[in-house]
Amino acid sequence: MTGPRNDPRVVRFTLSIPGDVYLSYYEGSARAVVVKSSDGRNIQFPAKNLRQFVTRDGIQGTFEMEFDENNKFVNIRRVDD
């Protein structure tokens, strides 16, 4: 199985990072986030890609991350299930 819509360049994953934990990313003591995608791939990406989704409670939700043909980050969006 590949990513959503059978596109291997799109990775779907769910996050639940409490606010105090994300603070360590924001302060720079942790720079990368590692997640297991819904299709079983392990994905590592810069924590800064999540900044737009941070609330006082942290980051919660299901997300899709898109990469180009060279596996470079293109976009991330929150999706509703």
Image (tube, rainbow, N blue to C red):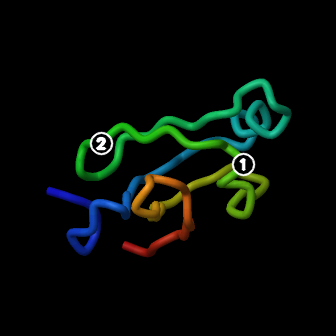
Label 2 amino acid? Arg
How far from the left and from the top, in percent, is residue 51?
74, 55
Q: Name the N-terminal-most of marks 2 and 1.
A: 2
From the viewer's perspective, is residue 50 above or below residue 79? Answer: above
Which quarter of the rendering shows the N terminus? bottom left
**Does residue 73 appear to the left or right of 62 in the view shown?**
right
Q: Nearer the viewer, residue 13 or 3?
A: 3
Label 1 amino acid? Lys
How far from the left and from the top, in percent, is residue 40?
25, 43
Residue 48 marker:
1
How many other residues sit within 10 Å of disc 2, few (<14), some (14-19) or many (≥20)?
A: some
**Does residue 32 appear to the left or right of 65 in the view shown?**
right
- Report the residue at 53% width, 46% height from top: 16
Residue farthest top in this picture: 29
Read off the residue under disc 2.
41
From the viewer's perspective, is residue 61 above or below residue 37? Answer: below
Residue farthest right in this picture: 27
**SS at mark 2 in the image:** loop
**SS at mark 1 in the image:** helix
